[in-house]
Image: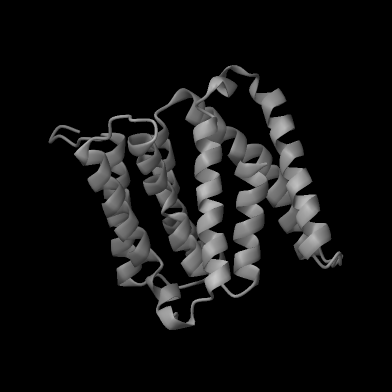
Amino acid sequence: MVMNGVYLGASWWAVANGLAAGVMALIGALQPLFTALIVVLILRGPISRRTVLGLVIGFAGVALVLSPRLAGVGIEGLPALPIALGLFSILALTVGTMVQKSSLATADLRAAGAVQHLGAAIVAGTLAITVGTLQWDNAPALWFALIWSAGALSLGGTALFVWMIRHGDVTRITALMLLVPPAAALQAYVFFGETLTAAQLAGFVVTLAGVSMVQGVRLSRKS
């Protein structure tokens, strides 16, 4: 209910109600930092300086990648409620991610996924009834978006993400989320003809360097 229902419901509502997509993407890049804070402050787990530095560098790279989308956004014009819900959605995703490292990790992934998506459906259904319009636009683009969201993202991407969280270090896995904005910018360039600026290309390199630091990748002369 938290990881899919609250996270997706709150973040998509925030974007639909005035929060720029670039700002939401930048807020989303805070998720690995939130995870590291929970590990240190609540779970009392160790976090190396290299990991913290890598997360900060990766976040800076994401900001560079999103700079064209953020250029026309003024701080004074940011809507308070969508910003709050955007931050709340990322906090919900972080908490839901940390739960995957509990005793739930021993449950069958398929059974756990079915229960989790049922919980998400309850949250989404409640939101649709209370704050939704209950209007269905029977357009091919909507059907494609629905199939992609349900199949590729929820069933495919979320299942793979949960599996990785269960079998790996949570800080390292969530650091991979920093690669989402650069990958989206690259896909927009390839499939939709959007331009890539020098700042975005530099941001891609910076983000990759930060994520590599978190993963503990070391390049030698031979490699």
| Quarter of the figure that contains the N terminus | top right
Residue 122 horizontal side relative to residue 20, left or right: right
Q: Residue furthest top?
A: 106
Residue 123 placement (x, y as % from top left): 74, 48
Q: Is residue 83 visible?
A: yes
Residue sitting at 64 percent across and 72 percent down? 17
Residue 92 horizontal side relative to residue 220, left or right: right
6 over 129 or under it: above or below: above
Residue 11 horizontal side relative to residue 189, left or right: right
41 over 125 or under it: above or below: above
Residue sitting at 39 percent across and 43 percent down? 175
Residue sitting at 20 percent across and 35 percent down? 218
Q: Is residue 153 visible?
A: no
Q: Residue furthest left?
A: 221
Residue sitting at 38 percent across and 71 percent down? 67
Front residue (pair 192, 33): 33
Front residue (pair 163, 121): 121
Give the colouring mode of the picture: one colour
Residue 188 placement (x, y as % from top left): 52, 64
Residue 29 placement (x, y as % from top left): 42, 55
| Quarter of the figure that contains the C terminus | top left
Give the total number of marks visible in the rendering: 0
96 over 14 or under it: above or below: above
User: Can you tell which quarter of the image residue 134 is in?
Assistant: bottom right
Residue 80 placement (x, y as % from top left): 53, 72
